[in-house]
Image (cartoon, rainbow, N blue to C red):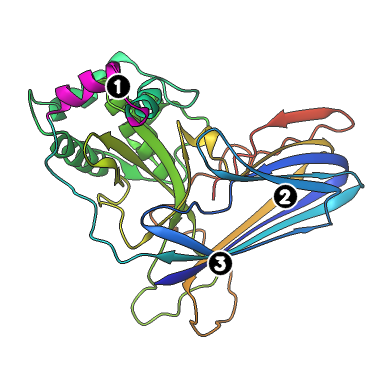
Amino acid sequence: MIYRVVHVTEYGYTDPVATSHHLLHLAPRDTERQVCRCDELTVAPTPASHAERLDHFGNRTTYFEMQEPHRHLTVESRRDVELLPLPAPPSSGGPAWETVRDRVRQPTDTALLEACEMTYASPFIRISDDVVAYARPSFAPRRPLLDVVADLTHRIYEDLTYDQAATSVSTPVDEVLRLRRGVCQDFTHLEIACLRAMGLPARYVSGYLVTLPVPGKPRLVGADASHAWLAVYCPGIGWVPTDPTNDVVPDQRHITVAWGRDFGDVTPMRGVIVGGSRHDLRVSVDVSPVGERERVDQPADDNQPARGAINERGGGDGTTTGGSGTSAKADRQSE
């Protein structure tokens, strides 16, 4: 199946932005389970310059800069992605989790060395005694790694309530654990923290979730959302994904864009601007089968989000406006 992903970000500034620099993670990766068949990126006004490159993790990134004053900025990404008809990733078995932990501690090949990088704390994922205490019930001695992951995924799904109003993009893992509420990036950060706390490699994955319309209702164009899940490294198998927000093994409904240590490595859009004062942000995401009959564009219902939307609270996508000065932070665009 080939899906067309349309991701539109629109800014409106109260004062002109004199100049700005932006970095995008919007281009889906090619993996063994998917192939990006078509790429189209439109930026208005036209950037003064732009460039594409692969980042440290092999993600496709786009950099652009604006050098003319502007009050509006629109970034529209259109990508056709084919999800390949492969068997679903395994959800049980594998070596004992202690065996994986010990092998990763002393990497003997490139794959294990790359996995080792994903065992440490990162800016959005800190390890604490509370995290260790929450993780331990899933880690019975000599339990197969993927059984551990399946149990932990299910526990997080059952213990946490999906709530877009409960957290912001900067909410620490310990706070998510205390609240027992959050969105997909919170569920994902918590499970990664639990796995890393026990010495296991886990990475953050950003992408899109193919959603289905309510029976009897048309699919609302623009009502889809970015999503987040994780993958754990299992020697002999590779990186195995799991989605704690929905308690599923990602397969034919998950489109991968990028991966890294945590959300900060794969932010859809981040930047630095001069001027602008306050800004308004509108984000629209649509994922639909290629060839599907065009439908009338309708705004998303903010009161009925798909279970998988990344948090927008805490500054929208986070481009900081700074009057006549320069301000910077990740554009935490968190649809």
Mark 1 to mark 3 CA distance (whole Å): 46 Å
Q: Is residue 178 magenta?
A: no
Of 266 and 156, the residue lying toward us: 266
Pointer 3 local density, CA inside 10 Å: few below 14, some 14–19, many at least 20: many
Q: Amino acid at mark 2?
A: Asp
Which mark, residue 108? 1
Q: Which residue is mark 2?
A: 280
Front: mark 1 or 3: 1
Q: Amino acid at mark 1?
A: Thr
215, above or below 6, in the image: below
Q: Which SS class for mark 3?
A: loop
Name the residue furthest front. Answer: 109
Bounds of the magenta segment = 96-111
Q: Quadrant of the N terminus?
A: bottom left
Q: Which SS class for mark 2?
A: strand
Q: Which SS class for mark 1?
A: loop
